[in-house]
Amino acid sequence: MTGRLEGKIAIITGAARGTGAATARLFVEEGARVCLADVLDEAGQAVALELGDAAMFQHMDVRSEGDWNRAVEATRERFGSVNVLVNNAAILDVGPIAELDVEKARDILDVNLIGPMIGTSAVLGDMQEAGGGAIVNIGSIDAMEGMGWVAPYSASKWGLRGFTKSAALELGQLGIRVNLVCPAGGSPELTQGFISNIQQRRDAGETIELRGLEGGVLGEREATPRDIANVVLFLASDDAGFCHGAEYMVDGGHTAGHIWFATKSDAKES
Ligand SMILES: NC(=O)c1ccc[n+]([C@@H]2O[C@H](COP(=O)([O-])OP(=O)(O)OC[C@H]3O[C@@H](n4cnc5c(N)ncnc54)[C@H](O)[C@@H]3O)[C@@H](O)[C@H]2O)c1
């Protein structure tokens, strides 16, 4: 049986851990050859090593045009022209707008939004050479809704959503599909800083209630990296040949709306 990504040559950013690493594993299982790119060299190299000859690691800070060009070139030399890009790398910070850290906010926009823009531009030549391609951007439920205390992150993901749609309109003519996957959850490492920041504020005497994800009709859990990777796999594959310029939620129904009249099956014990 052939894999669903046979003949695909992919760059996945932020692939040293979490959703990026899970996506790289699934891509290789399905026959793709993958360049894992990240700033975390040791962790990224370890995942690439585990995946064998179908994988390579490339150091990349997604903010750097030079790093992008080197990664595209190295992937082409090793495997051939890049025809899939997964813009997955991101950072997160937490805090009220009243205490805005301008440098951190700029950094979040740089990594989460400008990074995918540079990456999209960097792979265009290869994708045209390959006769088309697929770009999958990783958004968040925060690209569909707002979230208090993570305004710069949410703004970066709304920006990425807008970029996805504009890129889809521009690049569809070149045979390049562009889509956005919006999970609620992923790697606990992304939110670790978030949790410890809240804890520090509590230790300093602030009362902060952590409400978590309310309203997930499939249960109060978060998406796992594999849940997300499964959707990325579909969008990167030719099975998604008519899917373009859209958002794909992986959130257990969290953003579907709200339940006003609870029936017996969705009523919660009080
Ligand atoms: N974890 C969640 O709860 C959650 C929820 C919704 C959306 N997401 C999104 O899922 C995606 C994957 O995140 P994750 O959950 O696996 O978190 P993660 O923190 O484990 O993964 C992010 C990866 O990006 C890398 N990275 C950070 N800055 C970089 C840079 N400048 N250049 C290159 N790589 C860089 C990190 O080293 C890390 O390996 C992100 O786009 C994130 O916004 C995560």
Image (cartoon, rainbow, N blue to C red):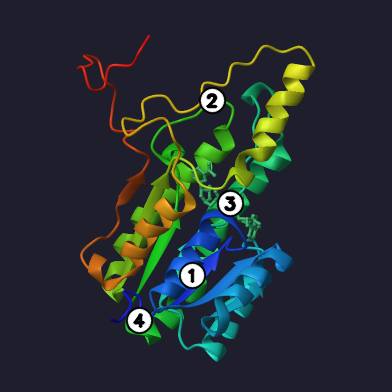
Dot 4, crowdedness within 10 Å: few (<14), some or many (≥20)? some
> Could you tell me which secondary element the residue under label 4 belongs to?
loop
The residue that label 2 is drawn on is 148
**Image quadrant in which the N terminus is located:** bottom left
Which one is earlier in the sequence, the residue at label 4 or at label 1? 4
Three-letter amino acid code of the residue under disc 3 = Ala
Front-lying residue, 140 or 30: 30
Does residue 80 lie above or below 96 as drawn? below
The residue identified by callout 1 is 121
Cα gap from disc 4 to disc 2, whole angstroms: 42 Å
Callout 4–callout 1 Cβ contact below 8 Å: no
- Measure how far apart labels 4 and 1 are at the Cα level: 24 Å
Residue drawn 72% across the image and 25% down it: 199
* Rendered location of residue 202, percent (x, y): 73, 18
Mark 3 and mark 4: span between their CA atoms? Answer: 28 Å
Q: Are marks 3 and 2 in contact (CB under 8 Å)?
A: no
Q: Secondary structure at mark 3?
A: loop
Residue toward you, 241 or 223 = 223
Which amino acid is tagged 2?
A: Gly
Where is residue 244 drawn, in percent x and y? 27, 60
Image depth: mark 4 or mark 2 in front: 4
Residue 3 at x, y percent in the picture: 33, 77
